[in-house]
Image (cartoon, coloured by chain):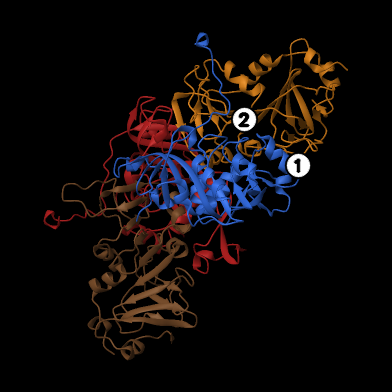
Chain colours: A blue, B red, C brown, D orange
Amino acid sequence: MKKVYGSASEALDGLLHDGMLIAAGGFGLCGIPELLIDAIVEAGTKDLTIASNNCGVDGFGLGKLLDSKQIKKMMSSYVGENAEFMRQYLNEELELEFNPQGTLAERMRAGGAGIPGFYTKTGVGTQIAEGKEVKQFHGEDYILEEGIFADLSIVKAWKADDTGNLVFRKTARNFNPPAAMCGKVCVVEVEEIVERGSLDPDHIHLPGIYVHRIIQGQHEKRIEKVTTRSREEA
Amino acid sequence: MKKVYGSASEALDGLLHDGMLIAAGGFGLCGIPELLIDAIVEAGTKDLTIASNNCGVDGFGLGKLLDSKQIKKMMSSYVGENAEFMRQYLNEELELEFNPQGTLAERMRAGGAGIPGFYTKTGVGTQIAEGKEVKQFHGEDYILEEGIFADLSIVKAWKADDTGNLVFRKTARNFNPPAAMCGKVCVVEVEEIVERGSLDPDHIHLPGIYVHRIIQGQHEKRIEKVTTRSREEA
Amino acid sequence: MMPSEAMGWDRNQMAARAADELEDGWYVNLGIGIPTLVANYVGDKDITLQSENGMLGMGPFPYEGEEDPDLINAGKQTITELSRTSYFDSATSFGMIRGGKIAAAILGAMEVAENGDLANWMIPGKLVKGMGGAMDLVAGVGRVIVVMDHQNKAGESKLLKSCTLPLTGTGVVDRIITNLGVLDVVEGGLKIVELADGVTEEQLREATEATIVN
Amino acid sequence: MMPSEAMGWDRNQMAARAADELEDGWYVNLGIGIPTLVANYVGDKDITLQSENGMLGMGPFPYEGEEDPDLINAGKQTITELSRTSYFDSATSFGMIRGGKIAAAILGAMEVAENGDLANWMIPGKLVKGMGGAMDLVAGVGRVIVVMDHQNKAGESKLLKSCTLPLTGTGVVDRIITNLGVLDVVEGGLKIVELADGVTEEQLREATEATIVN
């Protein structure tokens, strides 16, 4: 069963349709599926709902899908690092569903684990709780949050073998595993495809069962906020 | 903050009380906290409720706590690999709450993740659903299962550093991470305590935040069912 | 009526027939008993076996002397790993089961009803060891295939109008492979897909309590 | 009334005072702004910092030229790792937050009410970027410590009878550290724990809208 594809466009072939729900990995610009986003821009798929913690920046990452007006709705915890997002949002060209960051991650993980709903204390008594069921456990209020079941997951990992076993690197792991889990189909871009058996089976972060298609490519890996200390501080 | 203790008894000092709920890692006899179980036998703590997938065998693992009649109730998916379990159960000396294996694992993980309840399709329409809330999502029935919040977790890992970062080995991982997560206090026994910094931070299975006390010791690691193939088959 | 063991497929033939159900690229969970034998018949197909205690890519039993106490399957037997193997914890393992990532489970059963209800975990009045992962599997995997003898030792049908034993899951079975043939759970009852070697449709119908539809 | 910046502790003194709240062995989450400075004052205490994008054991900023795009904190700044560091995914990260494993969060705020309500994520009519992980943190961690100026730029109290802005969490704040002193949320209102250098109780009371109890 061949999982390795030649390019991002090939890997997405047949998987895109207008109005679909896509779950995307990444936090800020760290660990984002750059190449797959570019291929979706190229494909021109419209009216997308995207579950992703953030929405990129002007001209990079998911920001590109904003520029091309392919996004109908974002499900995110923190957005607006780009002017185009705010312009479209204030003009009501873009819908926005705020999710607390942990609720968003857990909703993805829940969707992937066949859990349609779970209770959390996060957001109780706030705007986030509006319209949501409240239930008491052990004398305290919790709200019901629903699992996210995406049509497609787009994910960035560090290494993969050809069966789709994935390894991530440092904080670039972030939302990638939960995003991968919640999609009907999951397409992954990696920096390196390694030989089967070369990844220690104890150290695989996401087993190949979650991964349907893989591409290897070059990543820009742009840094959003370069912060350093001077060597004198040491 | 010293997490490393000299013996299982020392590591459990002050943590045991009659009637408490203990979550234990392990599957069958694989990856069980042998040394901590022995220390609880020695301590003589009574009326224990134990959440563990299985209950050991006669004279080994949790079976020892059955022999000493310290267990009041088991929360398990599969039991009775020992005669003493069945004797006590049929004499109504022992309570038993069956949980489907995945529900048990998820209940532990949920407790550790601050989720007091979640919905699952597992067990809908069966004895397991009796007395549990049923809710529809997307036109299908799901039942509500509650998170497990244990007083103490007892866990077996392969390696730890002194900050409690853990690595497990092969299928001995099993219930150990979810069991570790759901305890107010978590005590871990390992085969080896390694120097801080020698575990790759990308390959830590359970971060030290979940681990309060650690001991290093010798493990019998008994095999329940030795099965082999003859070399001629190859 | 004759006990069914005498008729149709033997255990290995049933396992071979069940292996035909598996498609290239599938991740599959095999129950204990006859389902375990299915692994011997997958041939060249790219099938990855899950062991629900926390492993994908389950290999064969080890050679004598190479048993590893940290490497067992869900039946607690010593096994080996493959080049595709990955390990994970029980919550993750059942996350993939509940989440529908396992394409198929092949399981034994005590009873199957014509509406797809399955009973395979307890007989009231007898010692009950528990459901283990069976309830999670039947509720979660993509396709549930039951492999079992068509009749019990008393010669009674195990394919029933409705189950008499406590259920493992309701409406969960997709296909049943018995020594007499292959049947699908469809609207209104069971549909005969295939007859075992030397078994007539009449023999199969006669050995079946469940409604058989066209 | 004078803007509060002129009185009491400066930003670094507030951060130093907040660092006194942390106990040996704690796992702690620091918000952006003044809370970030707290890391400079933990001294010899064994404190492990969480970055909620998936890291425990957050180290200092890298030296120039050693930035790693795969290693950032929750404020998206480049950082470094330590010998105790571990990485994990966002679901696991917020599992430990929601599950109460993080002993304390030190956060900034726009408003705190005398019942512990906290508002720090949006001002209606202004651009709203989102709550990020703030709602999860205040609902989940063991102890929520707010560090903020006592008054806003217009000289109005940020410690209120009830919040006017949309809430981040209800009844979640345990302790407030401002430039004027330290206050605890207790039954009936706020209790003065400590006065900042050169600040009198009268000055603090005058600068506070919330009920102050003994």
Looking at the image, which residue is at 52% across and 20% down? Answer: D60
Visible residue check, residue B94: no
Q: For marks 1 and 2, give the CA distance.
A: 33 Å
Horizontal arrangement in the rendering, residue B128 relative to residue D122 (left or right): left
Residue C193 position within the rendered picture, expressed as x and y whole percent measured from the top left: 37, 80
Residue furthest out toward the left: B232
Horizontal arrangement in the rendering, residue B145 relative to residue D187 (left or right): left
Residues at discs 1 and 2 in contact (Cβ within 8 Å): no
Identify which amino acid the numbered label 2 is placed on. Ala
Q: Disc 1 is attached to a residue of which chain?
A: A
Frontmost of labels 1 and 2 is 1
Looking at the image, which residue is at 62% across and 52% down? Answer: A46
Judge if badges 1 and 2 mark residues of a common chain: no
Mark 1 neighbour class, 10 Å CA radius: few under 14, some 14 to 19, many 20 or more: few
Image disc number at residue A90: 1
> Residue B88 versus residue B146: which sits nearer the camera?
B146
Residue furthest out toward the right: D1
Assign a secondary structure to mark 2. strand
The quarter of the displayed image where residue A17 is located: bottom right
Visible residue check, residue C158: yes
> Residue A76 versus residue A124: which sits nearer the camera?
A76
In this rendering, the answer to whether A228 lies above or below B109 is: above
In this rendering, the answer to whether D160 lies above or below C201 is: above
Image disc number at residue D75: none
Mark 2 neighbour class, 10 Å CA radius: few under 14, some 14 to 19, many 20 or more: many
The quarter of the displayed image where residue B113 is located: top right
- On-image quarter of the N terminus of chain A: bottom left
Residue B193 position within the rendered picture, expressed as x and y whole percent measured from the top left: 34, 29
Assign a secondary structure to mark 1. helix
Badge 2 is on which residue?
D105
Residue furthest out toward the top: A232
